[in-house]
Image (cartoon, rainbow, N blue to C red):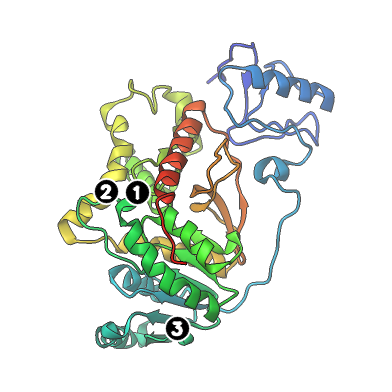
Amino acid sequence: MATPACSSGVRAIGYAGATHRGSRDSAYPRACVPASVRHVNREETLQLLSRSRRCKSACVVQATGSVSLREDLFGSKEPLFTDCRSSKVSIVGSGQVGLACAYALINQATCRQIVLHDIAPKMDRLEAEVADLLHGAEFVDSLDVVATADFADTADSDIVIIPAGARQNEGESRLALVARNVAIFEDIIPKIAAASPDAKLLILTNPCDIMTHVALRLSGFPSNRVIGSGTALDTSRFRSLLAHKLAVDTGSVHGMVLGEHGDSSVVLWSQVMVGGVRLKDVHPQLGTGDAEEWLRTLHADVVAAAGRIIKRKGYTNWALGLAVNAIVKIIIRDERHILPLSVPAKGRYGITQDVHLSLPAMLGSDGVQEIVQVSLSEEEVASLRESARILAEVQDTIVYKE
């Protein structure tokens, strides 16, 4: 199928970026080039990139025209490599989510030691849970699980997973949980940071983006080591629902949900691919009011998924436990996998507020290594900015203890 031409008479090539074979050092991430071009020099390349920026169909985030593909993709020239370290993981908060995380970590042999922490009144139940897990030691590679109410036992953790917080009630917005959970974080985050000053913090507590921002402030850690699970699960839900409707394997569906982990999240319809085919190229109605009804409601189904489950069983846990296991495994093994996670967003896509929201983040042994600079449509950028505005509005109401 021919590549459609835009209003400036040039044709778009490359989904996420391609190198034109006529010049080894010329990069064209989502650039527009004349259909007849086969060999061009750098000066011509930059002229073509300039023309592409004026093209009405061009995405808002444009290529820089730099020599380095890595710099165009991540905004940095050199990769950051650090040594993988030991694998002690602590989980602060042993409710249904914490236990689901522990079970996933154990079942997939992701780490060597797990410390489950909770408050003293819950120790009897937590010790019983740990005993139950230990009884399966014969059937897994290795198992070292500890129940504790003492933060000293979490000392020197490589990763601290934090699902601790007030439970979201049926029909309650994640953002309505802020005041209750900020008070909890003011108690636990300084203790966690003191016990494990080199740890990566993985925040699950809702509202995830705001609580990740709170954890960063209270811990004093660098931002690459305070990570929110963000829309990693939303993205999995989106890909799963789309794959089910198209009757294909979920692994063949690629697309991301960014922004708030909540009602103002943003589906990047411009980037959704199935089996290497960009859906917008074959179905331009995608993401508009002219799409099929199930496509128009797909994002709403993703947003409402947790609420439907909470209404029927009181909480969500299993899928989040699997998502957390994947994140922990990526960090421990320094896999440098890219996931949508809650990270600082100020200065990206015209966002001016000091907020966390989900962007494509490359994870490694030191936490967030890079943020991928994804090309977005004007509508997607506007939606992302609106998501940031909503989060900042709630964040501004937080009153911290002196």
Q: Amino acid at mark 3?
A: Phe
Circle 1: element type: helix
**Which disc, if any, is residue 229?**
none
| CA–CA distance in space, label 3 to label 1 | 34 Å
Outermost residue on the left side: it is: 312
Name the residue carrying label 1: 237
Give coordinates of residue 125: x percent, y percent.
Answer: 24, 84
Tell me the residue at 63%/72% (across/down).
84
| CA–CA distance in space, label 2 to label 3 | 34 Å
Tell me the residue at 62%/66% (across/down).
366
As drawn, is 401 to the left or to the right of 181? right
Name the residue carrying label 2: 305
Mark 2 or 3, closer to the camera: 3
Give coordinates of residue 297: x percent, y percent.
Answer: 28, 34
Tell me the residue at 66%/46% (across/down).
74
Q: Amino acid at mark 1?
A: Arg
- Do the CB atoms of the residues marked 2 and 1 lie less than 8 Å apart? yes
Q: Amino acid at mark 2?
A: Ala
398 is higher (above) or lower (below) than 387 = below
333 is higher (above) or lower (below) than 319 = below
Q: Earlier in the sequence, mark 2 or mark 3?
A: 3
Tell me the residue at 39%/53% (across/down).
233
Q: Nearer the viewer, residue 14 or 173?
A: 173
Q: Nearer the viewer, residue 46 or 186?
A: 186
Circle 2: element type: helix
* Within-10-Å neighbours for mark 3: few <14, some 14–19, many 20+: many
| CA–CA distance in space, label 2 to label 1 | 8 Å
Q: Earlier in the sequence, mark 2 or mark 1?
A: 1
Q: Earlier in the sequence, mark 3 or mark 1?
A: 3
Give coordinates of residue 120: x percent, y percent.
Answer: 31, 85
Name the residue carrying label 3: 151
